[in-house]
Amino acid sequence: MKFFVDTADINDIRELAETGLLDGVTTNPSLIHKSGRDFLDVVKEIAGIVDGPVSAEVVALDHQEMMREAEILRKIADNIAVKVPLTVDGLKTCKALTGEGTAVNVTLCFSANQALLAAKAGATYISPFVGRHDDVGYPGMELIADIREIYDNYDFATQILVASVRNPIHIHDAAKLGADVMTAPPAVIHQLFKHPLTENGLKAFLADWEKTGQRIG
Ligand code: E4P
């Protein structure tokens, strides 16, 4: 499973990139707003930090204007994945861009049929939002299971990018279902490293080691 971080915070991205475990970055207009920075500047900086795909979202609603914005975004760096919303115009744009060899992340997916449309439009990634689904009382993970089954039925190459991840359980469940990628806020990724038994065990080992009076090397 590939790990993307869902943020436009440069310090968080650098810190995670240093672990060697980060495969890409996703941003959205709300995260850009939170960063307080110029959209194109921040995307360029992120694309220079990580080798993997960096999703940058168009904000136009019509196909022609989406294509114009995508043109600007994909020129920023080779690892830009243009993010488009799951609308008729978004999927028209997806089809055109992937036909030209540009990676496309189709965002705001809330149903398996929408994911089927995105795959037919040649999407590189489909982003089903599990957390927002849970918020309205529908188990988001059922959506991931349905999309996995449908994509496997037809051997679609579109990668399932589990988005709107709120906690480690989302990641655990998505991995069991065979999702290709997950994108999570930095804090949720940091939670994955932690376990109280690891911390207690390490403390005890180090205390005993201290008693030996030895040092390595
Ligand atoms: C995905 O690409 C989105 O940026 C993101 O996962 C949305 O998450 P949220 O529902 O926590 O805003």
Image: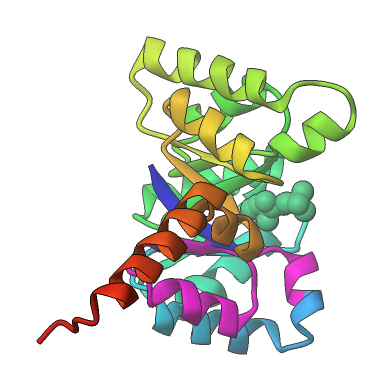
- In the picture, the quarter occupied by the N terminus is top left
Q: Is residue 45 left or right of residue 9?
A: left
Q: Position of residue 60 (x, y in %)?
A: 75, 61
Q: Is residue 43 visible?
A: yes
Please name the residue shown 48% across and 40% down the image. 123
Q: Position of residue 144 (x, y in %)?
A: 58, 25
- In the picture, the quarter occupied by the C terminus is bottom left
Q: Which quarter of the figure has residue 186?
A: bottom right
Q: Is residue 40 left or right of residue 13?
A: right
Residue sitting farthest toward the left: 217
Relative vertical location of residue 203 with respect to residue 118 in this rendering, above or below: below
Q: Which quarter of the figure has residue 19?
A: bottom left
Q: Is residue 81 left or right of residue 146?
A: left
Q: Is residue 127 left or right of residue 54?
A: right
Q: Which quarter of the figure has residue 127?
A: top right
Q: Position of residue 152 (x, y in %)?
A: 38, 16
The number of numbered badges drawn on the structure is 0
Please name the residue shown 73% across and 30% down the image. 110
Q: Residue 21 magenta-drawn?
A: yes
Residue sitting farthest toward the top: 153
Viewer-nearest residue: 77 or 20: 20
Q: Residue 10 magenta-drawn?
A: yes
Please name the residue shown 39% across and 10% down the image. 153
Please name the residue shown 33% across and 19% down the image. 155
Relative vertical location of residue 160 with respect to residue 73 in this rendering, above or below: above
Q: Which residues are magenta?
A: 7-32
Viewer-nearest residue: 143 or 139: 139
Q: Is residue 57 visible?
A: no
